[in-house]
Amino acid sequence: MPIKKGIKSVAENRKARHDYFIEDTYECGLALVGTEVKSIRAGKVNIKDSYVKIKNGEAIVVGMHISPYEQGNIFNRDPFRERKLLLHKREINKLRELSEADGYSLIPLRLYLKDGLVKMELSVAKGKKLYDKRHDIAERDAKRQIEQRRKEDRYSDR
């Protein structure tokens, strides 16, 4: 079977952009077993409540759910097991320093297939306060109303 070129998005953490200010992003691989890769290709993965922690000099993703592969029988692993991220040591050290800063977290933004390999977009994020979330919602509503009025004006001129 030939490896497909390009990027195919598999899972996205939309909640992260609502709950956090995204400061920086990184691309990293994951250490997975074969049945997990097959489940990811089928789109049976959830990264909504996951986060990354640095433990013993390794970056580990916690809370990511990969459903068991249907034909995997004895080769399936625990759906919620911790999975190692594949990063260079200098990147891990930099992420550890950033995550130890006050209010910063390491949050997965999306999971995708890039040239047949499973990759994760990892972000360094700072948590939003409730008033920040309200401000974002108000801005989005204002933009939506402006666009609606523009459309109405365009069609009323005819």
Image (spheres, grey):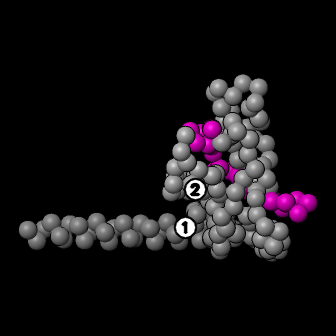
Question: Which residue is at a point 76% across and 63% down the rendered structure image?
Answer: 87
Q: Is residue 69 visible?
A: yes
Residue type at tag 1: Arg
Which sits in the foreground, 110 or 31? 31
Q: Position of residue 117 (x, y in %)?
A: 63, 52
Identity of the residue drawn at 13% across and 68% down: 156
User: Which is in the foreground here, disc 1 or disc 2?
Assistant: 2
Residue extending farthest front: 2
Amino acid at circle 2 = Lys
Please tell me which residue is depicted at 65% across the width and 74% down the height of the picture. 23
Query: Which comes before the other along the chain, label 1 or label 2?
Result: 2
Magenta part of the chain: 38-59
Residue 13 seen from this side: no
**105 or 78, which lies in front?**
78
Q: From the image, tell me which residue sits under label 2.
A: 114
Q: Choose between 150 and 106: the one closer to the eye.
A: 106
Q: Where is 46 relative to 123, above or below?
A: above
Q: Which residue is mark 1?
A: 134
Q: Is residue 85 above or below residue 3?
A: below
Q: Quadrant of residue 17?
A: bottom right
Assign the C terminus to one quadrant of the image.
bottom left
Can you give x and y, in whole percent of width and height, for residue 93 in the image? Answer: 83, 71
Mark 1: which secondary structure?
helix
